[in-house]
Image: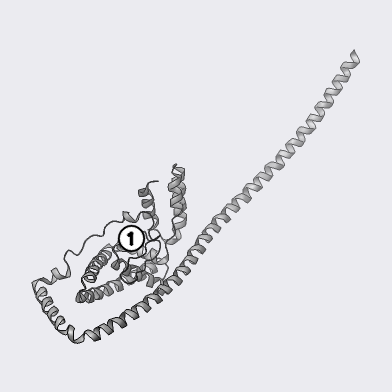
Amino acid sequence: MATDALTAAADELYGLVPEEFTAARNARAKDAKAAGDRDLGDHIGALKKPSPAAWIVNQLVRRHPDELDELHDLGEELREAQASGDGRALTRIGGERRKLLSTLLQRAIELADAADGSPSRAVLDEVEQTFIAATVDEAASGALATGRLVRSLQAVGFEPVDLDGAVAGEASAAPRPKRRLERTAREREGPAGDRAERAAQAERDARAERDRAARKQAETDLRDARERADAAQRALAEAEDLLHAAEWNADELRDERHELETRLKELRTEISEAERDEREAERVRAKAAIAADRARDDVEAAEAALDGLD
């Protein structure tokens, strides 16, 4: 099976509205098998319908690439600032990310409304968590850029995001986002920004000795609060995953029921035609039996007449 063929099929399918997905997937799988590639057909047939949040994210990737590029750039800056411990940069980037997420969520609402499917708060939360995950983890950013997400993504702190089963087709086939921002925050600030940063660093160093104990306690409290929040978020994510799994399963079963009902109607028609053919064949057989009996009588009569001549 050619993975690029599967990815091409997935690219098309995950750009469709949810109502068209199952029928289009089954048709593509059937075409692949008819063309002699049963393995490809089986893999296409196994593609899962995207969750509501994943569908919205996939559409935003396709329709608003500039804003998704900006999210990718913010993610790179965020990870660099986290690695270097640059508190000022983290604060700035966090503010920019919140503003961009607000814009993307508004886009999500407009997109879903246009498709006659106003998203619930839970779905919008999943959309937001997916975008956050893409800024935390580079691999998650690449997965999002494919536009072929099957489910939403979830980040836990700065740990690697779980991408198992999250992307349809080849995750490595994701196009690299265009680079809109060619300068880092430090480059944008220029020499004046560097001098201000050095002065601020000296001031932070002077204050560090005075408030070390208070900072340590604050960091401990913050860590504990984050751990509790992360635990609660994971519990919520697990509950939502269970709900979405049940929704997907019910949706798939409804699709299968529709196909089976259609086939049942076809079978009933075929049975009626077969029974009609059976009755007609029985009438023909009965006529043939009568004709055979008459022919045997004629043979016996002819034989008797022949015997009488001897």
Q: How is the model colour-coded?
A: one colour
Q: Amino acid at mark 1?
A: Ala
Residue 57 makes an appearance in the image: yes
Q: Position of residue 110 (x, y in %)?
A: 35, 69
User: Around disc 1, counting alpha carbons within 10 Å, would you say few (fewer than 14), some (14 to 19), or many (20 or more)?
Assistant: many
Quadrant of residue 84 within the rendered picture: bottom left
On screen, residue 95 versus residue 267, left or right, reads: left
Above or below, 212 relative to 3: below
Quadrant of residue 13 within the rendered picture: bottom left
Q: Quadrant of the C terminus?
A: top right
Judge by depth and name the residue closer to the eye, 258 or 33.
Answer: 33
Number of marks present in the image shown: 1
**Residue drawn at (73%, 39%), measured in percent from left and top?**
282
Q: Position of residue 301 (x, y in %)?
A: 86, 22
**Residue drawn at (54%, 55%), measured in percent from left and top?**
259
**Residue drawn at (11%, 73%), measured in percent from left and top?**
194
Q: Position of residue 235 (x, y in %)?
A: 43, 74
Above or below, 298 relative to 85: above
On screen, residue 257 versus residue 171, left or right, reads: right
Q: Secondary structure at mark 1?
A: helix
Judge by depth and name the residue closer to the eye, 129 or 139.
Answer: 139
Judge by depth and name the residue closer to the eye, 12 or 302.
Answer: 12
Residue 120 makes an appearance in the image: no
> Which residue, given by chain and number where applicable, does mark 1 sit on?
143
On screen, residue 275 versus residue 294, left or right, reads: left
Judge by depth and name the residue closer to the eye, 38 or 266.
Answer: 38
Q: Position of residue 34 (x, y in %)?
A: 46, 43
Above or below, 212 relative to 17: below
